[in-house]
Image (cartoon, rainbow, N blue to C red):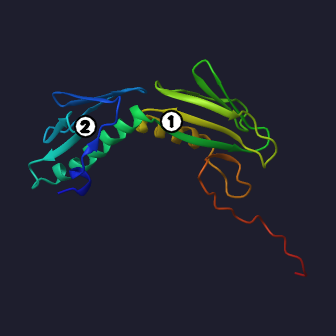
């Protein structure tokens, strides 16, 4: 049996968890999220104790064992998302690169002939701290905020994929906590042939 699946999900103050058939709906101060559960996994909501239990009766089937822990983790992520929220910090390195938000789109000017426009998904908020880079040392910084961990992570990955950091000067888009492995450039050999 899954060790993660057996742990109860604690419901904090101000968060409401409801079950409608196979669907679990979690609502809180930052919004509302839904999850369609696997038919073999049973969800028990204990309002008095303030917790959600995920149960799996059929342990012989491998997929049921896998979905036990996964379902519990997804419900826990939804509870954290609607109560505290998630954030992803990104930085852009490179001279003349900048970022701005306009008309529901994130516009990135990162060395291509045209700016790259990424539509901001519903439920994701963009907070730009530094709009433009200053040389190669001071990056442009922005933060993505949202309740849905999956949507937020996918949007951050799509942004980073536009121009991942290159290994020589480190130019490009990276996560704030990401370490870029740097390479040494070409060394010119001196001496006789």
Q: Nearer the viewer, residue 92 or 177?
A: 177
Q: Position of residue 91 (x, y in %)?
A: 65, 43
Q: Residue at x 25, y 37 (%)?
A: 50
Horizontal and vertical percent position of residue 5: 23, 50
Locate residue 4, reporting x and y percent.
26, 53
Report the number of numbered marks. 2
Q: Secondary structure at mark 2?
A: loop
Q: Earlier in the sequence, mark 1 or mark 2?
A: 2
Image quadrant where residue 2 sits: bottom left
Q: Residue furthest bottom?
A: 192
Q: In this picture, is 186 found above or below 9?
A: below
Q: Residue at x 19, y 44 (%)?
A: 54
- What number is the disc on residue 50? 2
- Position in image of residue 88 (x %, y %): 54, 41
Identify the residue at horizontal 79%, vertical 48% (top origin). 136
Q: Quadrant of the C terminus?
A: bottom right
Tag of residue 167: none
Is the residue under label 2 in contact with that under label 1 (CB below 8 Å)? no
Which of these two is toward me, 85 or 157?
85
Residue at disc 1, secondary structure? helix
Residue that appears at 41% across and 35% down: 81
Task: Judge by depth and name the residue closer to the eye, 154 or 125.
Answer: 125
Quadrant (top left, top right, bottom left, bottom right) of the N terminus: bottom left
Q: Residues within 10 Å of mark 2 (few under 14, many from 20)?
A: some
- Cα–Cα gap, marks 1 and 2: 32 Å
Q: Disc 1 marks which residue?
A: 155
- Compared across the picture, whether 152 is left or right of 105 comes to left
Which of the two marks, 1 or 2, is nearer to us in this view? 2
Hey, which quadrant is residue 149 in on the image? top left
The local crowd at label 1, few if under 14, some if 14 to 19, many if 20 or more residues have their Cα within 10 Å, is: some
The answer to whether 75 appears left or right of 83 in the picture is left
Q: Is residue 118 left or right of residue 190?
A: left
């Amino acid at each position: 049996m899954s060790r993660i699946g057996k742990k109860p999900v604690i419901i904090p103050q101000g968060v409401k968890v409801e079950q409608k058939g196979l669907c679990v709906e979690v609502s809180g101060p930052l919004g509302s999220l839904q999850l369609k559960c696997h038919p073999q996994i049973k969800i028990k909501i204990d309002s008095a104790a303030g917790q959600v239990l995920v149960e799996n009766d059929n342990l012989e089937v491998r997929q049921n064992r896998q979905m036990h822990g996964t379902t519990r983790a997804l419900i826990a992520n939804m509870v954290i998302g609607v109560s505290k929220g998630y954030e992803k910090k990104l930085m852009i390195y490179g001279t003349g690169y900048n970022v701005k938000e306009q008309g529901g789109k994130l516009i990135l000017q990162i060395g291509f002939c045209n700016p790259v426009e990424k539509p901001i998904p519903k439920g994701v908020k963009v907070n730009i701290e530094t709009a433009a880079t200053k040389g190669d040392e001071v990056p442009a910084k922005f933060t993505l905020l949202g309740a849905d961990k999956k949507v937020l992570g996918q949007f951050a990955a799509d942004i980073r994929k536009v121009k991942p950091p290159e290994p020589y000067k480190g130019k490009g888009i990276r996560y704030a906590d990401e370490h870029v492995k740097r390479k040494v450039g070409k060394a010119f050999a001196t001496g006789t042939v």
